[in-house]
């Protein structure tokens, strides 16, 4: 089930029930047909300490400020990590190599998806997309945003050709058969 934010009307009703009528969080939840944890979270997040208590207008302003702050992309990535990513991209490292190597060397943890997102966003206007191949960028463009599990257009093993059971060609052998044949040859 997805989370639905409180509306302005619900916030006004919450103010009336909590501040004026001084009802419990559980009772307010029942009256607003919301979970009591939603009400509790709303009160704890949006009560301004400088004010007397919960005010609906203040709650909306605080919520908008949090939303604006949340939309700042790549905010949690340090400047040193960004500089290291840029330097390694210029040395023609792939984002996958970059992410793994940087984590192993302890230079900052960043996922390859984030690196691709930085490239697509042309982060701070000086990430040079030409440092990685255009095909690589195109191949990962949709993968970052729309990852799907499983193999598309997969053919099940029950539809395998009958010749595969004969194991007459390379690729049809089982691993233990390959090992037995390689030990017999030597």
Image: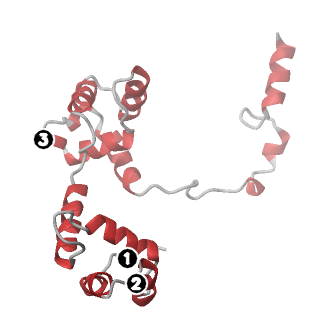
Q: Earlier in the sequence, mark 3 or mark 1?
A: 1
Residue at the location (36% across, 29% down)? 98
Does residue 2 appear in the picture of this structure?
A: no
Q: Nearer the viewer, mark 2 or mark 3?
A: 2
Relative placement, left or right, of 184 versus 170 is right
Task: Work out which residue is located at the far left of the displayed protein and give it.
Answer: 125
Image disc number at residue 28 = 2
CA–CA distance between discs 1 and 2?
Answer: 17 Å
Q: Earlier in the sequence, mark 2 or mark 3?
A: 2
Question: Foreground: 160 or 21?
Answer: 21
| Quadrant housing residue 169 | top right
Do residues under tags 3 and 1 come within 8 Å of each other at their CB atoms?
no
Q: Earlier in the sequence, mark 1 or mark 2?
A: 1
Residue at the location (30% across, 65% down)? 45
The relative height of residue 151 versus residue 109 in the rendered view (above or below) is below
Question: Foreground: 40 or 154?
Answer: 40
Image disc number at residue 4 = 1
Give the residue pinned by disc 3: 125
């Amino acid at each position: 089930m997805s989370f639905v934010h409180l509306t302005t009307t619900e916030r006004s009703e919450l103010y009336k029930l909590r501040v004026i009528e001084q009802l419990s969080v559980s009772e307010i939840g029942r009256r607003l047909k919301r979970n009591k944890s939603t009400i509790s979270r709303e009160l704890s997040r949006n009560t301004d300490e400088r004010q007397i208590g919960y005010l609906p207008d203040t709650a909306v302003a605080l919520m908008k400020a949090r939303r604006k702050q949340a939309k700042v992309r790549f905010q949690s990535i340090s400047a040193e990590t960004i500089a290291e990513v840029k330097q390694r991209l210029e040395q023609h490292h792939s984002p996958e190599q970059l992410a793994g190597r940087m984590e192993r060397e302890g230079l900052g943890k960043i996922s390859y998806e984030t690196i691709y997102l930085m490239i697509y966003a042309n982060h701070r206007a000086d990430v040079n997309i030409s440092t990685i191949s255009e095909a690589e960028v195109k191949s990962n463009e949709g993968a970052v945003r729309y990852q799907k599990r499983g193999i598309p257009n997969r053919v099940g093993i029950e539809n395998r050709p009958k010749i595969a059971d004969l194991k007459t060609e390379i690729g049809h052998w089982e691993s233990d058969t390959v090992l037995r044949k390689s030990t017999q040859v030597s």
